[in-house]
Image: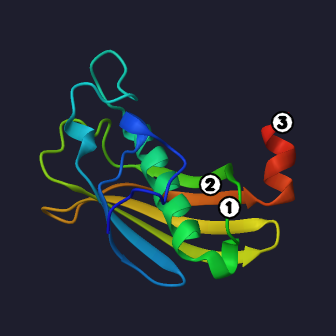
Amino acid sequence: MSMAGLLPQQGAMVLLDEVVAHDAKRILCRARSHRHPDHPLRHEGRLPVWAGIEYAAQAMAAHFSLDRGVAGPGTLGLLGGLRDVIAAVERLDDIESTLLVDAERLSHDIAGSIYAFRVTDEADGRELLRGRATVVQGAAAAARSVE
């Protein structure tokens, strides 16, 4: 499934290529943009592994879009916090194969959701980055976006 219409990002900031699978709790996406020399998150010619957090955030946003019964149409969501983030590599631009970005919603209430996320190398299944993220949504997100 194409990412068109699922994300608020536009142009080169749309980092994911497609949704591979999704259900009410989880989404799996594929990305190839980490190899692009003009990647918008590159710094000094390198794409740090921490850019994988943006890949995960986009997977969560796509999950919200696909699961409107939970998030609600047009729901604003902002990354509110990260926990237990562990990186197994220093950079993503030297990963030859496609990235798989997996996000699983662990809990949800009116204020937002908590997701566990993983970015892996599709070729060998090696975990590159993982962690948990809190996504603030609705009125709480709107209040934070104007601060």
Whole-percent x, y for residue 37 in the image:
21, 26
x, y percentage for residue 42?
Answer: 35, 25
The relative height of residue 122 versus residue 87 in the rendered view (above or below) is below
Quadrant of the image occupied by residue 69: bottom right
Mark on residue 83?
2
Amino acid at the residue labelled 1: Gly
| Residue 72: x %, y % from top left | 70, 72
Q: Which disc is residue 88 wearing?
A: none
Residues 112 and 65: in front is: 65
User: Would you say 126 lies left or right of 15 here?
Assistant: left
Using a 10 Å C-alpha cutoff, classify the residue at mark 3 as few (fewer than 14 neighbours), some (14 to 19) or many (20 or more): few
Q: Secondary structure at mark 2?
A: strand
Contact, mark 1 vs mark 3 (Cβ under 8 Å): no
Above or below 58: residue 11: above
Horizontally, residue 78 falls left or right of residue 58, namely right
Q: Secondary structure at mark 1?
A: loop
Residue density around tag 2, few if under 14, some if 14–19, many if 20 or more, within 10 Å? few
Quarter occupied by the N terminus: bottom left
Residue 15 pos. (x, y %):
36, 45
Q: Give the residue type that dot 3 points to.
A: Val
What amino acid is labelled 2 in the image?
Answer: Arg
Task: From the viewer's side, name the closer residue of 142 and 4.
Answer: 4
Secondary structure beneath dot 3 equals loop
Residue on which the image places disc 1: 74
Quadrant in the picture for the C terminus: top right
Q: Which residue is mark 3?
A: 146
